[in-house]
Amino acid sequence: MAAKPRPKPGCPVCSKAARPKSSFVPFCSERCKMVDLGRWFKGEYVIAGEDAILLDPGELEEHLRQLDESSGGGGARGEGGEHDDDA
């Protein structure tokens, strides 16, 4: 018995069929693509997981310094304590 072909998934925004060769896949149009992007920007979509911890630059430097000290000085910032791309 032959396997049944799977139905093509529709556009995630409007459920219309998307053209396979379209530059908007999986969306049916640029409009639906932009509607989806807007939903991400507004926070309507979320990815499950723990909330990110946002640090200001001073807190980040302190956190990196503590990591360097706890790892024996080499740590995340290298031997010299400077970022590689700062040289």
Image: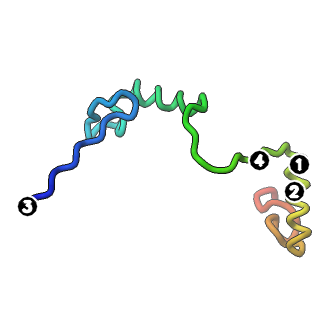
Choose mark 4 or mark 1, whichever is in front: 4
Question: Residue 57: x percent and y percent?
Answer: 85, 45
- Seen as rendered, the residue at the extreme front is 1
Which amino acid lies under the numbered mark 3 shown in the image of this protein?
Answer: Met
Q: Name the residue under label 3.
A: 1
Task: Please tell me which residue is depicted at 36% across the width and 27% down the height of the picture.
Answer: 14
Q: Residue at x 90, y 62 (%)?
A: 66
Q: In the picture shown, does residue 78 fall above or below 5? A: below
Which residue is located at x 56 percent, y 31 percent? 44
Q: How crowded is mark 1: few (under 14 residues within 10 Å), some or many (20 or more)?
A: few
Report if the CB atoms under discs 4 and 2 are less than 8 Å apart. no
Front label number (4 vs 2): 4
Q: Residue beneath label 1, please?
A: 59
Helix, strand or loop at label 2? It is: helix
Image quadrant in which the C terminus is located: bottom right
Placement of the N terminus among the 4 image quadrants: bottom left
- Say which label, 3 or 1, has the lower sequence index: 3
**Disc 1 element:** helix
How far apart are the two marked residues, 2 and 3, measured between alpha carbons?
62 Å
Q: Nearer the viewer, residue 12 or 81?
A: 12
Question: Is 50 on the left-hand or right-hand side of 35?
Answer: right
Please determine whether, in this image, residue 47 is positioned above or below residue 35.
below
At a point 68% along the width and 50% down the height, the residue shown is 50
Marks 4/1 in contact by CB < 8 Å: the verdict is no
Secondary structure of residue under mark 4: loop
Query: Label 4 belongs to which residue?
Result: 53
Which mark is on residue 63? 2
